[in-house]
Amino acid sequence: MIYKNFNKNFIYATFANCLFFVNFSCFFLLPLFLDSNNFSKSDIGIVMSTFGFSSILLTPYTSTLIDKYGKKLLSLIALLLMIFSSLLFIFVNSFEMILFLRILQGAAFSIFFNSSSAIASNSLEDKNKQFGLSLFSSFTIISYFLGPFFSEKIIIKFGYEEFFIYSALFSCISFGLMILIVEKKEDRDSAIGASSFFSTIKDNKLFKILFANFLLASGFGVIMNFLSLFLKEKDLSIGLFFVGYSLVVSLSRIFLSSRLSSENLFNKILIMLSLFACAIFFVPFISSTFDIILFSVLFSLTYSLVYPLLSSIALKGKAKSLSGRIFGAINSSFSIGVNIMTFLFGFIAEIYGFNIMFKCASIIILTGAFLLYFYEKRRVG
């Protein structure tokens, strides 16, 4: 694909999404704030997973509203929610209010990510979706460098108040970019109802894609939500993990996605998912800075292409007016994987410790990948 063929909507949506994700990814360090306020591991698991419950519950409605009233309008509303909820953390420290703010952030994520993804997808021809969506998501990953890496430095040098202001600034810039989006009438379908979200999943036979995405998300969630605390117990910093993660995932998506043949693509995804599970299994053996860097590379390489490739499979040949609901289904399965499994893993860590928690996560993902392989083999055969 030639980069100059990308239109302005794709470019604006890509950079706006990246900046939104800086704000979002900063909150992977929220467990440090909660720990400093004497919350337990199970409390932290509840708070971190609450983010996704609102996202999951609202997605059937928000993704339908996106297709019905327009991606641009809904994305602007979501950015305002994210800005205000991030800043309000400065003024609250009660468990109930923190849960409420995480619910608002979950709603903002549900709306914005589906909107910006749909805008990007609608700006691409089918033949370009595999690479285009990989490029789009590679800029999302860059955010983990600007987010957690610098946020950790800000927290150490200045404190949590400055951290929350820093995170909110990126959604402010994103808001300015989304205003520049020009949306066409064909990107909307004013006649649809909320129930069409579920019929879209059924009619387009998305189950295997959603389940694979769920497995990927469960591993992503356990690493992003608990690795900082695991490393803190060993007097290690998580900053280098996010640097390696950002670089490896971004470069993989930019340079490897277009080289991967679309033939038997789902089976290739399952291989990546199995290797991803194996990488997580070895987290308990991390004991040095070198180990963190090595894990960051292995985790990132096995994770990097799975989500964009699953998205490209789901969206090829589909009408633009369906893109919001399809992305809603994909992102909802990811949210379920991250947040419900984070909730479960928080209790496992509380009872058995982090070592058992990471190994359990690995085994669950590996088992799921094998089940999908045999399901696909039987379906094709």
Image (spheres, rainbow, N blue to C red):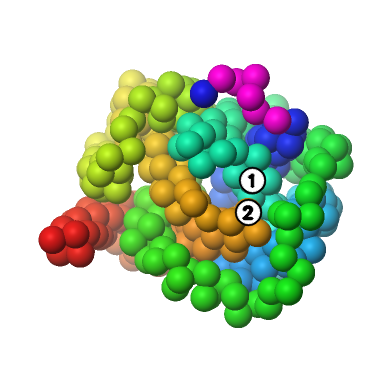
Residue sitting nearer the eye, 280 or 90: 280
Residue 333: x %, y % from top left = 47, 62
Q: Which amino acid, by three-letter code, is at mark 2? A: Lys
Which sits earlier in the primary sequence, circle 1 or circle 2? Answer: 1
**Residue at screen point 45% across, 54% down:** 314
With 355 as the anchor, is 126 left or right in this view? right
Q: Secondary structure at mark 1?
A: helix
Q: Secondary structure at mark 2?
A: helix
**Residue at screen point 79% across, 55% down:** 185
**Residue at screen point 35% across, 56% down:** 212
Residue corresponding to mark 2: 320
Q: Is residue 332 above or below residue 233?
A: below
Q: Which amino acid, by three-letter code, is at mark 1? A: Asn
Magenta-colored span: 2-7
Residue corresponding to mark 1: 122
Would residue 46 be seen by someone viewing this image from the given angle?
no
With 5 as the anchor, is 249 left or right in this view? left
Residue 3 covered by magenta stretch: yes
Q: Which mark is residue 226?
A: none
Residue 9: x %, y % from top left = 73, 36
